[in-house]
Image (spheres, grey):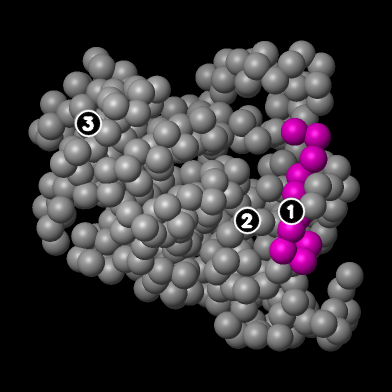
Amino acid sequence: MTGRVLVYGVTGHAGNVIARRLIEDGVDVVVAGRDVARTAAAAEALGRPGRAFPLTSDTVIDEALADIDIVLHAAGPFVETASPMMSACIRTRTHYLDLTGEWPVFTEAQELSAAAARAGVMLVPGAGFTLVASDCLLAHAAEARPDSVKLRLAVSRPDAVTRATIRSLASLIGPHIFVRRHGRLVPEPVGRLRRDIDFGEGLRETTAVCWPDITTAEFSTGVANIETFAESDWLQRIAHRLSASTGAMIGERARRTSSTILSLAWPERPPRASNRNGFVLVVEAVDRWRRATTFRMRTGDGYAVTVATACGMIRRTLAGDWSPGFRTPASLYGSRFITDIGCAELEEFRDLTISVS
């Protein structure tokens, strides 16, 4: 493997662990972040060069990326930080990967795809658990059932949530969620769409949410109707603390500030990985006669999966296995990528004899 990788956001848990793993694998890593003192401390601890720079000046970012081949961007909230970094990567001809699960970032990356392709670089937001697992399962379902006209994704609740996750969720709270209908994003009131899903231990109630696949699944699968759901008790806990009505009541800036303060109640780092911290993902592939086939995937701890998938994608990119423009994990490396690297297990699909709406 040849090339230099800049990990931006090394003062956070995920960025730091990814940088350490890449260094252990012999990758030429530069560590970076926004805070001068914390970035310097991380660089010293990792024994690698450090660069501290904000994402507010094109000139400053371009200078920092001048000798970089790949950026792994791990500093959220990505709805605020991804745009300047993606644009800089296009200008400096640097491949871009990040760990976002915030769906507007994927929309912007798709809009930048042509410019990235002309520059000969790749844009891959969602190189961590939040997109890789679901993208691979959705692609697998579409391959197994090519007659699908609608795909529904449901994700079980997490047993562990960190401060960064809460801040990311807070950036997306609003009065509506979105679903994809015939290739277009359509708003739905929060809480209106619900489904009972079997994650392996009986039916659980799920509620529609803005998982990033509403913007990426059509790209990966060719299916134009997509809905995404989360197990409701997780959603209810988050919604109780980050009410969608807050923005309308106190203003968007005040809501984000209060959400950032609230996030301090969560730990900065996840607890030690265990089987309880894994996820179950379910996809319903629906054909034109409204017959559904279900697919189920079990993953490891979400934070451990993020490290493995991001490092795996960086290694492949360094080895020359990449394509220009916007890409998703499954469109790059196939639907089996997450199982091939040992982060998930697929269950056999099951045909349902009943019709679904």
Element under disc 2: helix
Q: Sequence order check: which comes first, mark 3 or mark 2?
A: 3
Quarter occupied by the C terminus: bottom right
- The residue labelled by disc 3 is 63
Q: In front: mark 1 or mark 3? A: 3
Q: Position of residue 58 (x, y in %)?
A: 34, 28
Q: Mark 1 and 2 residues: CB-CB less than 8 Å, in contact?
A: yes
Q: Position of residue 107 (x, y in %)?
A: 58, 49
Q: Nearer the viewer, residue 119 or 353?
A: 119
- The residue labelled by disc 2 is 215
Element under disc 1: strand
- The residue labelled by disc 1 is 185
Q: Residues within 10 Å of mark 2 (few under 14, many from 20)?
A: many
User: What amino acid type is highlighted by mark number 3?
Assistant: Glu
Q: Sequence order check: which comes first, mark 1 or mark 3?
A: 3
Q: Residues within 10 Å of mark 1 (few under 14, many from 20)?
A: some
Q: Mark 3 and 2 residues: CB-CB less than 8 Å, in contact?
A: no
User: In screen coordinates, is 353 left or right of 218?
Assistant: right
Question: Spatial distance from mark 1 to mark 2, Cα to Cα?
Answer: 8 Å
> Does residue 277 sit above or below 236 in this rendering?
below
Q: Quadrant of residue 355?
A: bottom right
Q: Position of residue 273 (x, y in %)?
A: 41, 47
Q: Position of residue 65 (x, y in %)?
A: 23, 37
Specify whether residue 81 is painted magenta: no
Q: Mark yes or no: residue 107 visible.
A: yes
Q: In front: mark 3 or mark 2? A: 3
Q: Quadrant of residue 182?
A: bottom right
The magenta-colored residue range is 174-184
Question: Spatial distance from mark 3 to mark 2, Cα to Cα?
Answer: 32 Å
